[in-house]
Image (cartoon, grey):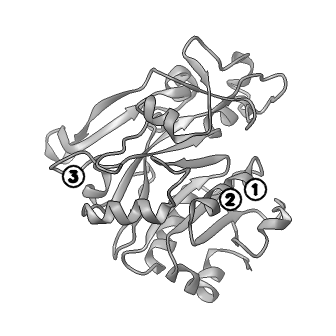
Amino acid sequence: MQYRDIDAFLAQGRQALATGPVAMVFAEDGAELDTCLRHHRQLGFATVLVFVEDVVPLARDLQGKVIRIGYDPRVENTLSQHVNKVLAATPEGTWMFYCYNAEYLFYPFCESRRVTELLAFHAEERRDAMLGYVVDLYAGDLDRAPEAVSLDDAWLDRSGYYALARKDPANHNHPKDRQLDFFGGLRWRYEEHVPQERRKIDRVALFRAKPGLQLREDHTFNDEEYNTYACPWHNNLTSAVVSFRTAKALKLNPGSTFDIRNFRWHNSVPFEWHSRQLLDLGLMEPGQWF
């Protein structure tokens, strides 16, 4: 299915949102778009929406299996606007996910358990959202992969991650309950090239639609409970979104590309494309799910 834009989809194809979970993939370019879409279909998302410019092709095996919606990634605040329009049209209680191209959702035991199993357990714990961490990936050899994107030679930082209390301006800047701002990866190592408001790596990866829910530009929601990392009584599941997006941006940006000869440092390790590695590095949490 293909639609001219989000308004055409909501007018003619919104019935697809009745079958969840729903994944939304926002394509800033064509880099690893096909692999991103295949990955999330294989995880078990029933409906996959891809927001993409007309000039970007999709692989033949994906045609008819994802819903293509026209999209201009250069418009300011376009992702949050599109997510909120889809949210408003989605039946209450439907689980949803969003990411950019060249990003891949991982959760504990995802190699053998479908995302529907994960979400059923999370819902039983009375949780309507799941915190995720955006873990930067980068090509190990920038001469061979000048845009820093390589599935076969992907690396990540094994350390250098930290969290700070998230202050509440409405409450004299006291820390918010069960909310933290997380930092690390390339946005931390190359912070001089990253605007301060874009340095956080936490993202509410999975969430349930409900009336009035709105995504904000900083990847948090207007319902503060959605932004918490755990419920009050014990730790919950968390997930990771492994992403080439920051590395790609740093190499494509004229202001930073010539300052970066190689992203690897002494704390770089090859990415094994397996949830066990992310669990061992503490980049996601299984909670009570075994």
Q: Residues within 10 Å of mark 2 (few under 14, many from 20)?
A: many
For label 3, the residue is 231
- Amino acid on which disc 2 is placed: Leu
Looking at the image, which residue is at 34% across and 73% down?
212
Residue 255 percent across, percent down from the top left: 69, 25
Q: Nearer the viewer, residue 215 or 16?
A: 16
Q: Is residue 209 visible?
A: yes
- Amino acid on which disc 1 is placed: Asp
Q: Earlier in the sequence, mark 3 or mark 2?
A: 2
Q: Residues within 10 Å of mark 3 (few under 14, many from 20)?
A: few
For label 2, the residue is 37
Query: In whole angstroms, how far apart are the C-alphas of marks 3 and 1?
Result: 36 Å
For label 1, the residue is 34
Identify the element where label 1 is drawn.
helix
Identify the element where label 2 is drawn.
helix
Q: Nearer the viewer, residue 57 or 289?
A: 289
Query: In whole angstroms, how far apart are the C-alphas of marks 1 and 2?
Result: 5 Å
